[in-house]
Amino acid sequence: MFPLDLAELDVFIMVATERSFSRAAEKLHRTQPAVSQTIKRLEEELNERLFDRSSKAGRMTEAGELLFDYAQRLTQLKTEAESAVKELQDLRHGRVIIGANEAAIHVLLPVITQFRQEHPQAQVEVRRVSSRHMSSEVLNRTLDFGVLTFAPRERGLNTLVLGEDELVMLVPPNHSLANREEISMEEFGSQTVIAHNEASPARDRVLQIYEERDTSINILIGLPSLDGIKRAVEMGLGVALLPKRCAHAEIARGDLAAVKIPPLRLTRQVRLVYRREGEMSHAAAAFLQATKVSA
C-alpha cells in the first residue's frame, strides 16, 4: 500500500493532459521546478516512472497511463463528495422564500409543516406579495415560489395545485342568515359588507358580477387584513365574503358560520408557482418535493 495525495494527482493529471511540464505549471500557477518535484515525489511513492523523459511530447509510460485512468476517477469522486457535502450544508442552512397573500397562508401551512419535519434547520420566509406581482418576482428570482389562485399567463413558470378553495359569506352564529345553506347575491349585497381594502382578482371579479347583473353590493367597511375582517364579523359589524379555508378554525369553533352564495362561490385552485428553467437551491428543491408529497 502507498499513500496517494489527491493534490499530487491533480498535478499529474494536468501534466498528462497538457503533455508538457511547463504548460501544466502555467495552468496551475506554479513554477516548473515545483511541478517537476511533485511528479518526481509521486514516482518515488509508486516506484514507477510515469512519463518518458526522452519524449518531447510528454508521453506517459504504461504505468502513467494506468494511473491516469484511476486518478481521473479519484478526483471525480472527490468532486462528487464535496458537492454532496455542500448540498447537505446548503439544505440544512438554506432558506426558502415564498410569496403569498393572506388567504394563501392557510393552504401553505401543511406544506411548511411537512418540510420543517424533514428539514428542521432550514428557514422558511413567507412574504406578503400582491398576486399582480407574484409571477414577475418568481421569474426575477426575488422569490423561490409564489402562491396564486389562477394560472399565470407568463411563460417560463410551472404550477402545482395545492388544493381548492371557494368564497363563502361569513356571518356571526346569531345572524339571521347563519342557518341558511345558501342565499342569493342580492341578499348578500343588501347586507353591511366588510371587505378587504386591497384590490385582488377575486374582489374585481365579484364587483364585475354585480355590475353585469345590474345589482348593488353594500360595501361599507374596508379593513387591511383578513384577521381584522373576521374579528369585525364576529363582533357583528357586518358580513364578509372570504375564502372558506382562511376561516376554517373560526367555523370549526362556532365563532363564525359559512353560507354559500352560488353565483359568487368562485371555486378556484390554489397553485404553487415556480420557475420552469434555471437552477433551484437545494432548500427550494426539497420544499418542492415536500409540496408534491402533501398535495
Image (spheres, rainbow, N blue to C red):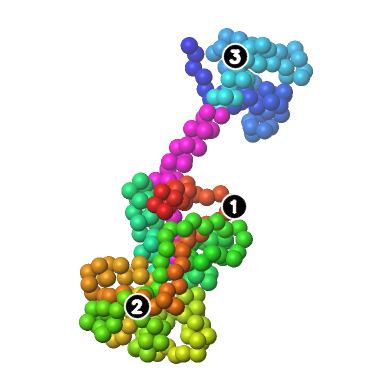
Q: Nearer the viewer, mark 3 or mark 2?
A: 2
Taking the magenta stretch, the answer to whether it contains residue 90 is yes
- Percent across and percent down for residue 282 are 47, 46
- Percent across and percent down for residue 192 are 34, 88
**Residue bearing the label numbered 3:** 43
How far apart marks 3 and 2 lie (CA) works out to 87 Å
Pointer 3 or 2: first along the chain: 3
Outermost top residue = 47
Q: Which mark is residue 293?
A: none
How far apart marks 3 and 1 lie (CA) works out to 47 Å
Q: Nearer the viewer, mark 2 or mark 1?
A: 2
Q: Given the image, on which type of amino acid does mark 2 rest?
A: Glu
Taking the magenta stretch, the answer to whether it contains residue 182 is no
Q: Given the image, on which type of amino acid does mark 3 rest?
A: Glu
**Residue bearing the label numbered 1:** 277
- Percent across and percent down for residue 123 are 38, 54
Pointer 3 or 1: first along the chain: 3
Q: Give the residues in magenta.
A: 76-100
Q: Nearer the viewer, residue 97 or 146?
A: 146
> Could you tell me which residue is drawn at 46 percent across and 41 percent down?
87
Q: Which mark is residue 182?
A: 2
Q: Are marks 3 and 1 in contact (CB under 8 Å)?
A: no
Q: Please determine whether, in this image, residue 1 is positioned above or below residue 164.
A: above
> Could you tell me which residue is drawn at 51 percent across and 67 percent down?
150
In this orientation, does residue 121 appear? no
Pointer 2 or 1: first along the chain: 2
Q: For mark 1, give the secondary structure.
A: loop
Q: Please determine whether, in this image, residue 261 is positioned above or below residue 5.
A: below
How far apart marks 2 and 1 lie (CA) works out to 45 Å
Q: Nearer the viewer, mark 3 or mark 1?
A: 1
Q: Is residue 81 left or right of residue 64?
A: left
Q: Main secondary structure of the magenta part?
A: helix
